[in-house]
Each structure stands twice: as structure tokens, then as C-alpha cells.
Amino acid sequence: MEISKYTKIVLSAAQKRGVKYEALRGYPHLFLLRKNDKHTFVFQSTTELIPSSSSQICANKYLTNLILRRSGFPIPQFIISKEKKDFVKFLKKYKNIVIKPLFGNQGKGITVGITNEKQIDFALKKAGEAIAQKDINNVYASYFLAQKVVCGFDHRLLVLNYKDVFVIKKVPAYVVGDARHTIEQLIRMKNNDKKGHQKDIIIDESLEFVLRQQKLTLKSVLPRNKTVYVRNTSNLATGGESIDVTHLLGKRAREMAIDVARTLGMPLVGLDFMTFDIGAGKGYFLEANHVPGLLIHHFPQKGQPRQVSNKLIELLIKKGVL
């Protein structure tokens, strides 16, 4: 059985601390960790430190937004609905919006930069397809979330034990023109030259939608040195890039991130925070991830690697779980 790379870094950290592990038959991504007479279970970065109720809240983007807004944290204006007319009304008020499914990760089904009614149709279609793939059986399954678009770069703030905060700046997939090759050719060239854990830039309907928003197509030839973002979301799964900027984290953003984690009851949580300056800390929380990927902190494409899995295992031992 091939172990997920997201889980493998946690198991490797456990081994270094004398913790043994074994896979559970029939559950390929769930592992038993054992040290002396103590044991616990791990699924990627999820352990028994995370309350089930908190996980349920974080898995629902609407509930997360609602709780954080009521607690006074900066959250973009948002609505939840299953009716197109409500999103049209929301668009008329805020001019530039994002529509996303309430459940899911890796940017699946999210459409950013919606400025007209036709784009709402496309966004609802993509969000619906993403939910259909997950087969969600939930009262919210037929609802979608719309948020006002806020500017900045998406930063993943990983909070551990309400004390440590690690920061990855996520850059959307992009290409740089050379006055010779088409955008499609530039994408394929970049995919062939990807480094480390970087994922391919996927050419699909959503990418072409982003190009149309910029009055471009896959056949467009860009001027030399012109940078064009081919995704509006910065997810690494679709070719985005990661930069560790933990050293730039300011006091205000750090304290807010820890306060958000405490409010959600999550000693380990990944928070998406949109800002131009992580040092100043002025920005907006977008989402909370209850199964945050630790791999991007271990292997950023730029910046200092952070051995966060080691700290997770140390926390399990400190708390007496192992």
C-alpha cells in the first residue's frame, strides 16, 4: 500500500520520536500510532486533539464565516443561497464576487472575479459539479456561498497549539510571456520544468474562464516579460506556488490567527487570510481547514522549510496522547 505523502511526513516525524505505526486494514489513510502503553490514530494531519464538533464547523464554509463574523473577526461580506436571483442581487451590490461550494478543498468549484450575470451561471455550474463529486448528504448540500472579492495575496496561516503560527504565501498559477509562444505552450513548458512538489497547471474550463476575463485565450501570445495569472485561486493543487513568509508575520496577524483557532476550538488549523502585507496584518479571513496540508510547510518552493510535523508529534506526546 502506498502511503499518502501528506501522511508520510507525520509518520516519519513519529518514528524519529520512537513512535511505532501501523496501517488499519480496510482504511488505507488511517494509521495507529503507538508509544509504550499509549496509542492514538492519525489521518494526514488530523488527530484526536481536534474535536469532532469543531471539524464539522470548519468543513462548512458558511458556518465558519458565520461564527467568525459574529466573533468580530474580519470576514468579507457573504450570503448563502440556492437561488440564482440572490446571487444576482448580491453582485449588483458588491460588483465583484466569488461563488463557492460550502464543502471541499483545493479550490474545487470556486469561481473568483464574477462581474456579470452570465458568469454567475458558470460559477453555479462549477460549484454544483464539485458538490456532486463529493456526494454530500447534508441540509446545506444544495446551497452555495458568495463572498465579496477582497484584494491581496492568499496566505495560509497554520496555527499549532494556540502558540506557533507558520505562514505560506500562495501565488496563483501564472505564466510569463516571451513574445513567441502561446499561453498554452507557456503552460506546457512550465509544467515540464516544475520543481519539487509543484503541481501541473491544469488546462480546463475554469482556466479558460479566467483567460476570458482578461480578454485572452490559450492561443494568445503575450509580450515579453508580461505576467498573466491563469487561475484566480491560489491553490497549489492547480499549479499555484508556495513561499514561506513566516519571518514576515506581524504581531496583529499572529494574535488574530491564534484567537480564530481558539474561537473554533482547533489546536491545529489552517486559515486562509487575504492580505497584501502579512506584517501589517490588515486583511480578511476566508476559510478554515480542519485537515490542513503540512506538506507545503515542509517543502515550500521558496523560503525556509518548517518541520511542522515534528511539532505535531511533540504536542501529542506533551498532551499525554502518546
Image (spheres, rainbow, N blue to C red):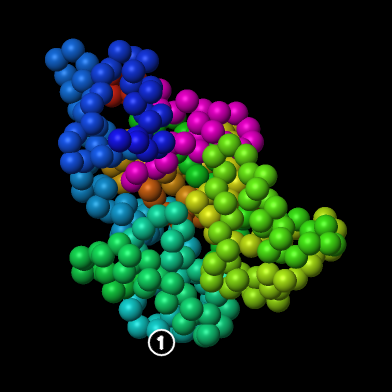
Could you say which is closer to the camera, residue 77 or residue 217? 217
Q: Quadrant of the N terminus?
A: top left
Looking at the picture, how far across and down is residue 22, in whole percent? Answer: 23, 26
In the image, which residues are magenta?
Answer: 290-311
Instruction: Tell me if 273 is positioned left or right of 41 in this view.
Output: right
Classify 83 as above or below 234. below
Q: Is residue 300 visible?
A: yes
Which corner quadrant of the image does residue 313 belong to?
top left
Could you say which is closer to the camera, residue 291 or residue 80? 291
Please tell me how crowded label 1 is: few (under 14), some (14-19), or many (20+) other residues with Cα within 10 Å: few
Q: Main secondary structure of the magenta part?
A: loop
Looking at the picture, how far across and down is residue 35, in whole percent? Answer: 22, 16
Amino acid carrying label 1: it is Lys
Which corner quadrant of the image does residue 213 belong to?
bottom right
Looking at the picture, how far across and down is residue 235, in whole percent? Answer: 52, 53
Classify 182 as above or below 297. below
Instruction: Tell me if 98 is positioned left or right of 85 in this view.
Output: right
Question: Which residue is drawn at the image coordinates 27% and 53% (left, top)?
Answer: 57
Classify 245 as above or below 321. below
Q: Is residue 268 visible?
A: no
Question: Which residue is drawn at the image coordinates 26% and 65% (left, top)?
Answer: 135
Please say whether residue 128 is one of the residues in the magenta stretch. no
Instruction: Tell me if 159 is positioned left or right of 179 in this view.
Output: left
Which corner quadrant of the image does residue 183 belong to?
bottom right
Q: Residue furthest left?
A: 37
Please say whether residue 298 is one of the residues in the magenta stretch. yes
Question: Which residue is drawn at the image coordinates 62% and 39% (left, top)?
Answer: 195
Could you say which is closer to the camera, residue 280 or residue 226? 226
Instruction: Tell me if 279 is positioned left or right of 317 in this view.
Output: right
Q: Which residue is mark 1?
A: 85
Q: Quadrant of the C terminus?
A: top left
